Image (cartoon, coloured by chain):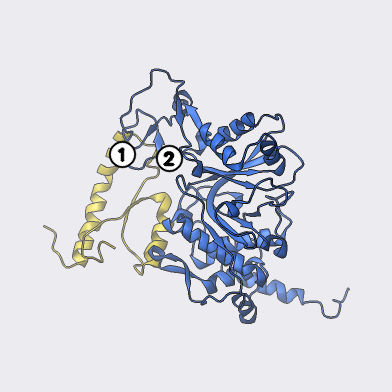
Chain colours: A yellow, B blue
């Protein structure tokens, strides 16, 4: 939704919700929509573990963000 | 080989139709009733509403549950056409309740639709309000409840493992429709309490997480009975957010016990709300003594998301979990044959009455 409004965005979800994420993309007319899947779960992890997950996911987030910017015709700095 | 009797339906053809619906994923796992255009027309003829009228909008899923889709799914569920005005009133109540349109049926919690019917429609349609009220055996209860669930699956696209992300769900998802036992109750019905006239039928609806069995055959003291219900309503496992709420489905024997001691329904609700607390120690033992800043969920006080709070000097001090009588609704149902009642765990509302809609028949 944000991207359709011209705002670069990256969707994150845990791998337990992959099927739903892909169904949602299809439902909204955007099959193959790229998102970043994180290892499940989130709620029962410590703050340190969450920080590590965020660090590990960062390259993927940048990759998807870059693809989104290209799609929108913006050259990443 | 036995020949089918003259005029009997072709069972093989019926089975093929049933399998056709399975192949398209249009069931809840049980066989559905095949629906033709002419059969659908019988349902739509019971209401003056436009078949294209939207009952439940779900814009984030690009879906709308229309009157037509509700009718198709009522027919699939096994409803008779004359049940349809009750099904429509139930959908209107779900809209008024507000949880469904806030995506609750996509949540991992896995709530079931809960429908209660009041007034003369109960007798006219054969809805059970007496013994085995939660159990099986009554077409109107079974199929009206199922019509809602099938409407969610087929009309709103909330299929398990896809948009319905329930971690475990509840058996109540197959069907959960009861009627108030107004004849054996000492009090006016929940519908009457909410300004529905005595000649009108009505339907209340909300979403529920579970139905808890309450064994209370042991006492004739209304205070003890109220405490027993309050304890179950406030079990720590029910606490996601700060507060507790639910329906107490009183069997007529319990209702009469309260009435015999001069307690009105409002008195019972007030007593249960008043006793709706746990000690700080109880909550801390389960790690639910604090509230998260963002979500408002309960969690341990040492969790990084916990709002700062003072630990009480006396850990046995009460923490009030039911903060309004609106969080405790009472329906009388079941047989007047034992001290067995139930608690229906809801997601609120915490500070307003239930959503109830009058049944409009053509």
Quarter placement of the C terminus of chain B: bottom right
Quarter placement of the N terminus of chain B: bottom right
Q: Is residue B154 left or right of residue B11?
A: left
Q: Is residue B203 above or below residue B13?
A: above
- Camera-side residue: B88 or B202? B202
Q: Is residue B4 left or right of residue B305?
A: right
Residue B3 locus on image (x, y percent): 87, 76
Residue B327 locus on image (x, y percent): 50, 43
- Dot 1 corresponds to which residue? A50
Q: Are marks 1 and 2 in contact (CB under 8 Å)?
A: no
* Badges 1 and 2, same chain: no
Residue B134 locus on image (x, y percent): 67, 50
Q: Is residue B203 left or right of residue B128?
A: left
Most extreme residue toward the right is: B1
Q: Is residue B291 above or below residue B83?
A: above
Real-space Cα distance between discs 1 and 2? Answer: 23 Å
Foreground disc of the pair 1, 2: 2
Residue B145 locus on image (x, y percent): 62, 59
- Camera-side residue: B98 or A52? B98
Instruction: Give SS at disc 1.
Output: helix
Q: Residue at x 72, y 48 (%)?
A: B184
Q: Chain of mark 2?
A: B
Q: Is residue B248 left or right of residue A33?
A: right
Most extreme residue toward the top is: B313
- Camera-side residue: B320 or B294? B320
Q: Is residue B293 above or below residue A14?
A: above
Instruction: Give SS at disc 2.
Output: loop
- Dot 2 corresponds to which residue? B241
Residue B210 lies in quadrant: top right
Q: Chain of mark 1?
A: A
**Is residue B348 visible to the viewer in this orientation of the structure?**
yes
């Amino acid at each position: 939704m944000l991207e359709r409004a011209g705002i670069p965005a990256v969707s994150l979800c845990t791998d337990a919700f992959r099927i739903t994420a892909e169904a949602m993309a299809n439902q909204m007319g955007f099959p193959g929509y790229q998102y970043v899947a994180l290892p499940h779960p989130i709620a029962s992890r410590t703050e340190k573990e969450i920080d590590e997950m965020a660090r590990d996911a960062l390259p993927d987030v940048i990759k998807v963000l870059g693809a989104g910017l290209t799609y929108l015709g913006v050259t990443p700095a | 080989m036995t020949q089918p009797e003259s005029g009997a339906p072709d069972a093989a053809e019926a089975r093929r139709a049933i399998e056709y619906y399975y192949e398209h994923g249009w069931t809840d796992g049980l066989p559905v009733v095949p629906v033709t255009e002419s059969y659908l027309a019988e349902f739509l003829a019971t209401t003056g509403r436009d078949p294209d009228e939207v009952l439940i909008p779900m814009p984030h899923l690009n879906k709308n549950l229309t009157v037509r889709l509700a009718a198709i799914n009522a027919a699939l569920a096994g409803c008779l056409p004359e049940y349809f005005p009750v099904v429509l009133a139930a959908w209107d109540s779900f809209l008024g309740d507000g949880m469904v349109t806030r995506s609750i049926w996509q949540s991992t919690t896995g709530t079931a639709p809960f429908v209660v019917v009041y007034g003369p429609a109960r007798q006219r349609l054969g809805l059970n309000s007496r013994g085995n009220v939660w159990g099986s055996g009554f077409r109107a209860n079974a199929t009206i409840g199922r019509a809602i669930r099938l409407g969610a699956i087929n009309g709103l696209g909330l299929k398990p493992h896809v948009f319905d992300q329930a971690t475990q769900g509840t058996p109540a998802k197959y069907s959960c429709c009861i009627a108030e036992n107004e004849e054996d109750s000492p009090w006016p019905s929940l519908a009457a309490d909410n300004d529905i006239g005595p000649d009108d039928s009505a339907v209340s609806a909300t979403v529920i997480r579970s139905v808890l069995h309450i064994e209370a055959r042991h006492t004739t003291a209304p205070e003890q009975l109220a405490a027993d219900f309050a304890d179950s309503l406030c079990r720590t496992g029910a606490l996601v957010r700060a507060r507790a709420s639910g329906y107490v489905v009183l069997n007529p024997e319990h209702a009469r016990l309260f009435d015999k001691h001069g307690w009105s329904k409002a008195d019972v609700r007030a007593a249960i709300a008043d006793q709706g607390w746990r000690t700080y120690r109880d909550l801390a033992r389960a790690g639910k003594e604090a509230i998260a800043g963002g979500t408002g969920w309960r969690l341990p006080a040492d969790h990084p998301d916990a709002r700062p709070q003072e630990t009480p000097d006396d850990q046995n001090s009460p923490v009030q979990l039911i903060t309004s009588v609106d969080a405790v609704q009472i329906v009388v149902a079941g047989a007047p044959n034992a001290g067995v009642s139930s608690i229906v765990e809801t997601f609120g509302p915490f500070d307003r009455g239930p959503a109830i809609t009058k049944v409009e028949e053509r």
